[in-house]
Image (spheres, rainbow, N blue to C red):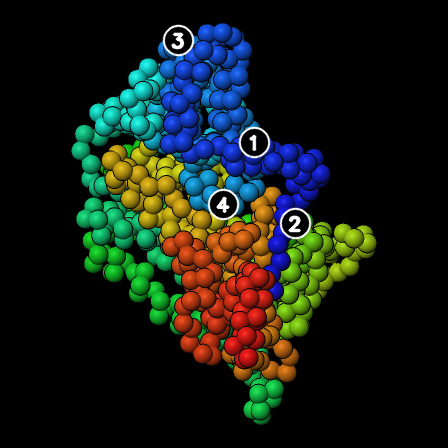
Amino acid sequence: MTKVHSPREHRSAWVWRTGLLLGLGMLVWLWWWQAPDEAAWLALVKSQLADLQRWHQASPWQFRAAFFTLYLLVAAFSVPGIAVLTVAAGAVLGLGWGVLLVSFASTLGATLSFYLARYLFADWLRTRMGPRVQAMRHSVSREGALYLLGLRLIPVVPFGLVNLLMGLSTLRARTFYGVSQIGMLPSTVIYVAAGQQLGTLSSAREVLSPALLLALAVAGLAVGLLPLVAKQVLARLQQRRLLAPWRNQRPRRFDTNLVVIGGGAGGLVSAYVAAAAQAKVTLVEERALGGDCLHYGCVPSKALIHSAKVAQQVRNAAQFGVVAPAPDLDFPALMARIHKVIASIAPHDSVERYTALGVDVLQGHATIINPWTVEVTRPGQGPQRIRTRAIVIAAGAQPVVPDLPGLHDVGFATSDTLWSQLALCATLPARIVVLGGGPIGCELGQAFARLGAAVTVVEAGERLLPREDPEVSDLVQSALQGDGVQVLTQHQALRCTKGSGDDAQKSLLVRDLRSGLEHTLCFDLLVCAVGRRARLQGYGLETLGIATERTVPTNAYLQTVFPTIYAAGDVAGPYQFTHAAAHQAWYATVNALWGDFKRFAADYRHLPVTTFVSPEVARVGLNAREVDAQGVAFELTRFDLADLDRALCEAGDAAPRGFVHVLTVPGSDRILGVTIVADRAAEMLAEYVLAMRKGLGLKAVLGTVHAYPTFTEANKYAAGNWQRAHVPAWLLRGARWFHTWRRG
């Protein structure tokens, strides 16, 4: 199934735009239809040169006005022959008037084309030009008007293309006009001057000799490099200004090339990359290596989720023709398995492994003293100061504890403390309340319910997983409710209470934001899963003047305000995923080690995201909610898992749940984003991540052989749905006629 969606903000202007488009379209068609090509233009001008000169001598102002108008229209609509018109200006008007009229007419025409691209043809141009628009916008934002000046000084760069692309940029119109006026002047003078030799020219291209073309190219290249050089100079000056108060503390020699603060996903990758690059690196971690993901997050939660999945399979075994008793939960054994899984993965992140890789691992607390010095405090030892060329902060994040009256009196668990609290329990708590309907809350809530607890998920927002499309949220809520979870969206937690005595009842008072009614939820375990915030306090950032409100502010290269200090992972944001931290750590480390010579901007365009509920929710790129909010035209192609053979093989009494949503550029197979809801969505998504990373479209996915029967076939079928929707009707009619004719 394929649907095309257009941005809401463009609908209101449909009427006047349609009329204007029809008028301009007719004008452009007439010009292009009647206008000869460049060779014909040159022949026409040469044959009529004497008549044109006589007209100019008889009525100079009339001729100049007519020529100016003609040139402006040719420039505005990029009609072939503009170079020949410039040459003709020199032959008829002479150097002075020729340069004057051509310079202003070409710039005004270019500005008109600029306005048409920005206010009339923007959607169509973005669809047709795609990546070129993004590349140009990035260059303009980085280099500003100097980028346009470099293009204008190189005459081989298409005149009309520059106008259209700049219309889609953030460049101001008056800046565009001024830079174009200056940038096109040199080539205008050259062409007009060459017009005096019009009789000897057989092509407008002969105006540019190889030597002249090389000179202009060198000039354009010099101007193109100017913003880069200027940016480097300004960056150096800014660095000197920032480091000025600390200059007398800069060491002459360094103990190490890099100090990494934090031994979680980001810190471990950073240390690994630095050691692989043969740099001397020191890794400082106060707690156990592996960070939150290994000890409190991804690993234990996924182990719990799998145990819950097994319990659910046993519970539903009769649907598959297997007679089995109801699952009997051995909770201590379940918790022992979780800790066994952690122990089996821990060697991958151990001190011994990283020491063998060449990393100097220090167990202690790190404090940044100045941009080149880190002080490490270890238990039972005096502080040790390390002089380093660069620092990467990868301290991770910690759970947010809501300011809820009575919360600390009743006791609660977070994603960090949950596992140690559960390890003390002989049985699974019978009644569990989860605060927060984000990924963590949904994952834990469903898992506990499948293990047999009475679970209530409280979410203040309108729906679960608010970053996903509404249809995804609805399906996840239905899945949780099907597993016995009570889902209370648009409910505000008011306060916690606890009765008296050793066996006092614990409860949470909530208010329904729709009706205003209040009711009480009794619980044995309260889990706070309302979010996580960067771990920024106690590392000396405040002393240095680095902002620590939410995350550490960084530039595109993950560099803080200090050129020697970088940040990666949760402390840098905006993503709080293990793979995002590892992704950022590579950029931060490479830039920290080699940034004086070559830097790399972090690329988040193809970052996958997965929520491990059942069915899983995985996506990459934009979803329908995001493209609609951004006003981007898109086409939606859908394939339902209910039609997938492998899903039907593994389904019980109910039909398979889930779907594949692919967003593409209208009329193109270029992928804007993918959302998959399925039991193996995370694995299925990898194919689309690779396709988007390599610039491949749905045709490439459709042309890839997929093993049968597999869940990844859903990707091929989604691509097939897109292909069927884009087969021209006339082609189908022609094929039908052909086969009818073949039958006789």
Residue at 56% across, 52% down: 666
Vertical comparison of 466 with 169: above or below: below
Residue at 28% across, 27% down: 206
Dot 4 corresponds to which residue? 128
Can residue 300 be seen here? The reply is no
**Position of the N terminus by quadrant:** bottom right
Vertical comparison of 711 with 434: above or below: below
Q: Position of residue 69 (x, y in %)?
A: 53, 19
Dot 2 corresponds to which residue? 404
What is the crowding at mark 3: few (fewer than 14 residues within 10 Å), some, or many (at least 20)?
Answer: few
Q: Nearer the viewer, residue 143 or 376?
A: 143
Q: Secondary structure at mark 2?
A: loop
C-alpha gap between disc 4 and disc 1: 15 Å
What is the crowding at mark 1: few (fewer than 14 residues within 10 Å), some, or many (at least 20)?
Answer: many
Residue at 21% across, 41% down: 256
Instruction: Of the two numbered discs 2 and 1 on the same chain, state the one appearing first in sequence.
Output: 1
Q: Position of residue 451 (x, y in %)?
A: 58, 75
Q: Amino acid at mark 2?
A: Leu
What is the crowding at mark 2: few (fewer than 14 residues within 10 Å), some, or many (at least 20)?
Answer: few
C-alpha gap between disc 2 and disc 1: 55 Å
Q: Nearer the viewer, residue 639 or 338?
A: 639
Q: Amino acid at mark 3?
A: Gly
Dot 3 corresponds to which residue? 96
Instruction: Of the two numbered discs 2 and 3 on the same chain, state the one appearing first in sequence.
Output: 3
